[in-house]
Structure formats: structure tokens, C-alpha cells
């Protein structure tokens, strides 16, 4: 099986670290504040693509009791 392509879009680079703007809260945050998702077959060659989530963890409700989102990284396909 081919390795997935990693696709990360960032809005700023500060001190060599990538930062991304959350469209929900409008804050520019470190890329560590965003989860990852797998886009099956989205690459040009049909490979899977790993990309950063659009919304930051607080806006997605990750870790909030009663949230529908999961913090379990093993839940990715």
C-alpha cells in the first residue's frame, strides 16, 4: 500500500513554525492546535491525503464532555 501524501496549508510561519487561522474563531494558532484528517483517494495519483482540520480543537469541541468529536487518534481510518 502506498504511503499517504501529507498536505498542510498554513497562513503564517513564525520562527520556522507553521500557524493556521481557524475560520470559526478567527484566531491564528500553532498547527498543533488543529487535528488531522485522512482524505481517502484525494491525491493526484489516487493516494490518500493527510490534511489539517479546518477548525481548531477548542472550536471543534475536542475534549469537551458531551462532544460528538473524539480525541482518540485511533479512530482515523
Image (cartoon, helix red, strand yellow):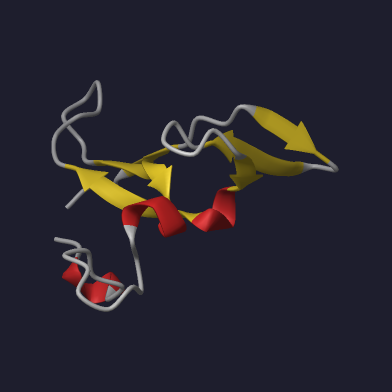
Q: Nearer the viewer, residue 33 or 1?
A: 33
Q: Residue at x 16, y 53 (%)?
A: 1
Q: Is residue 3 visible?
A: no
Task: Report whether 7 appears left or right of 16.
Answer: left
Task: Report whether 14 appears left or right of 24.
Answer: right
Residue 53 spot, x, y in % from top left = 36, 44
Compared with 21, 76 (above or below) is: below
The quarter of the image holding the C terminus is: bottom left
Compared with 39, 72 (above or below) is: below
Q: Residue furthest right?
A: 15
Q: Residue at x 62, y 45 (%)?
A: 29
Q: Residue at x 31, y 73 (%)?
A: 71
Q: Is residue 40 visible?
A: yes
Q: Nearer the viewer, residue 51 or 49?
A: 51
Q: Quadrant of residue 46?
A: top left
Q: Residue furthest top?
A: 44
Residue 65 spot, x, y in % from top left = 27, 78
Compared with 11, 33 (above or below) is: below
Task: Report whether 66 appears left or right of 9.
Answer: left
Q: Nearer the viewer, residue 49 or 63?
A: 63
How many numbered marks does the figure carry? 0
Residue 10 spot, x, y in % from top left = 57, 31
Compared with 31, 32 (above or below) is: below
Residue 70 spot, x, y in % from top left = 23, 70
Q: Residue at x 28, y 49 (%)?
A: 37
Q: Nearer the viewer, residue 46 or 57?
A: 57
Amino acid at each position: 500500500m502506498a504511503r499517504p501524501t501529507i498536505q498542510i496549508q498554513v497562513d503564517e510561519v513564525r520562527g520556522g513554525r507553521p500557524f493556521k487561522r481557524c475560520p470559526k474563531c478567527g484566531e491564528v494558532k500553532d498547527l498543533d492546535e488543529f487535528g488531522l484528517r485522512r482524505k481517502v483517494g484525494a491525491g493526484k495519483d489516487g493516494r490518500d491525503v493527510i490534511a489539517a482540520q479546518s477548525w481548531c480543537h477548542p472550536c471543534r469541541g475536542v475534549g469537551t464532555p458531551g462532544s460528538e468529536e473524539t480525541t482518540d487518534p485511533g479512530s482515523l481510518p
